[in-house]
Amino acid sequence: MIGGKTRAALESFAAEVGSDSPVAVVGGRTHWDLGGHCLEETRLVRAPAGIREFDPADMTIRVGAGTPVEELDAALAEAGQQANLPLVPGATVGGVLAVGRDDVHALGRGRLRDALLEAVYVADDGRLVKAGGPTVKNVSGFDLCRLLVGSLGTLGLVGEVILRTWPRPAAQLWMAGQCDPAELRRKLYWPSSILWDGQTSWVHLEGHESDIESEAEQARLLGCDSTDGPPPLPAYRVPATALESERFPGRYLVQVGTGVAYVSEHGPLPDPDPAVVALHQRLKWQFDPRGRLNPGRDPLAAI
């Protein structure tokens, strides 16, 4: 149940969004031009910020969408927990959810969309709409939360969310070596990340100290040694299958098991399937028939 102060903040946010003229939510601007540029006449609004409710025993947290992800992470760390959100400096909770990009730990920690349990957003007509619920098993029918993640704010402007949290690992370790990434994935129980640049593999282990020691020994047998951390990610994110086209001659880094790769030189990508394009258009028309929410942005262009 949403408390009085929280409800007032959301109603104020909805009133600012209104029911006419182009409008977009601005956060930390860390991925501001992703998927296209907003039209010049677009009004910019900010979502409510701040942690509303947090009971560590429930392993959920209610937070304003305008809250910086670093602030959220610091609050959860005090309780020995974490949320599965990329820790992009300066980014907001609503921003990283709207962008919808998993971080390098998606292999072990799961997808970003799995972290969002409930969202309160402003629809194109200015109404506040609640999607999902504050429990892990809350979906019966259409899962609006999964639609909102990665939508770039084109379906609704998120004001507040409830996120699922996880225990913070007691120990973690990065290892690297010239070993087969597929073999690492087969032999290790639950690595949180495996990265591969065609020659070197990086693997991240996390969990209890005894488990890490056991997994690290297995990784050493496969040719890995401890290292300070992962390599810097190349600038552009592409589907891993795009590397097969040989259109990306520069450096690349594959995020094993997730279907994602990073490349240093941008290249042409295959056109989306016409059926996927048609589905996106139908969803946009259903949620925002006047095209006033984040106009100029296209989730299909935000690879």
Image: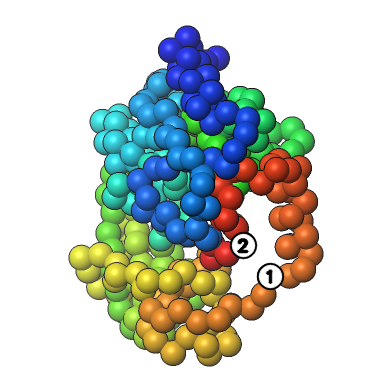
Q: Residue at x 41, y 68 (%)?
A: 194
Q: Which residue corresponds to the image point at 37% horizontal and 50% vertical from the top-left?
A: 29
Is disc 1 placed on a helix, strand or loop? loop
Q: Secondary structure at mark 2?
A: helix
| x then y, percent, for residue 198 | 41, 85
Tell me, for residue 17, which label it has, or none. none
Rendering coords of residue 163 (x, y %): 48, 34
The reply to whether residue 188 is in sight is yes
Task: Give coordinates of residue 303: x percent, y percent.
Answer: 54, 65
Quarter placement of the N terminus = top right
> Pointers 1 and 2 in contact (CB under 8 A)?
yes
Q: Earlier in the sequence, mark 1 or mark 2?
A: 1
What residue did someone put label 2 on? Answer: 300
Task: Specify few, some or many for label 2: CA neighbours under 10 Å numbering under 14, 14-19, or 20 or more.
Answer: some
Residue kind at label 2, given as amino acid type: Leu
Amino acid type shown at disc 1? Pro
Q: Position of residue 96 (x, y in %)?
A: 44, 47
**Up/down of 254 relative to 40, above or below:** below
* Label 1: few (<14), some (14–19) or many (≥20) C-alpha neighbours in 10 Å: few
Query: Which residue matches tag 1?
Result: 272
